[in-house]
Image (tube, rainbow, N blue to C red):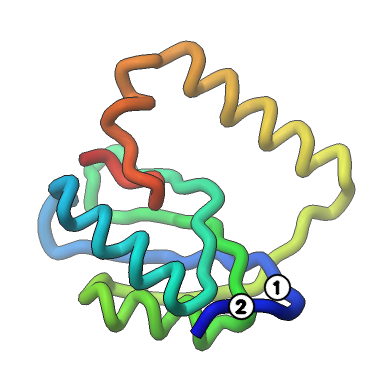
Amino acid sequence: MLCHGAVATYIIERTFAEQLELTGDDVTLIEEINADEGVHWLFSFLSADRRRTYCLYEAPSAEAVMGAARRAHLPADAVTEVNATTPELSGRLRDWAASKTEAQPSQRDTRSPNGIPN
């Protein structure tokens, strides 16, 4: 179900039983499922122990985010709608993310479009 209407921003918290390791094929499948559900990944954080992720998505609804997670067989502990408090904060987050990518070019190649290291 491709999204043609308004979207909101959601953060999803995931807890994994083991350290997260995804193959290129896993990432491709997740991308296809997300696109089918109208879900667009924006940014992710991975905990130091590699067992929790906090991922930011644009989607038509929290149900679309949960549906994509179910179809991809990924955990989804909580989905919360969020928004930037000011446009300046959104810009600062984008700048910070870009600086991290530039500072660690090797990680750019190991990050999936879902922000999860391969």
Disc 2 residue crowd, few under 14, some 14–19, many 20+, Cα 10 Å: some
Query: Of residues 55 and 22, which is closer to you in this image?
Result: 22
Q: Residue 38: x and y, percent?
A: 53, 74
In the image, what residue occupies the spot 14% across and 48% down?
23
In the image, which disc is placed on residue 7? 1
Residue 61 found in image quarter = bottom right
Q: Residue 37: x and y, percent?
A: 46, 79
Residue 56 found in image quarter = bottom right
Which of the two discs, 1 and 2, sits closer to the camera?
Answer: 2
The residue under label 2 is: 3
In the image, what residue occupies the spot 33% across and 24% down?
107
Up the image or down, 114 lies above or below 81; here it is above
Determine whether label 1 and label 2 are within 8 Å by CB.
yes
Q: Given the image, on which type of amino acid does mark 2 rest?
A: Cys
In the image, what residue occupies the spot 58% across and 19% down?
99
Q: Horizontally, is 107 left or right of 19 in the view?
A: right
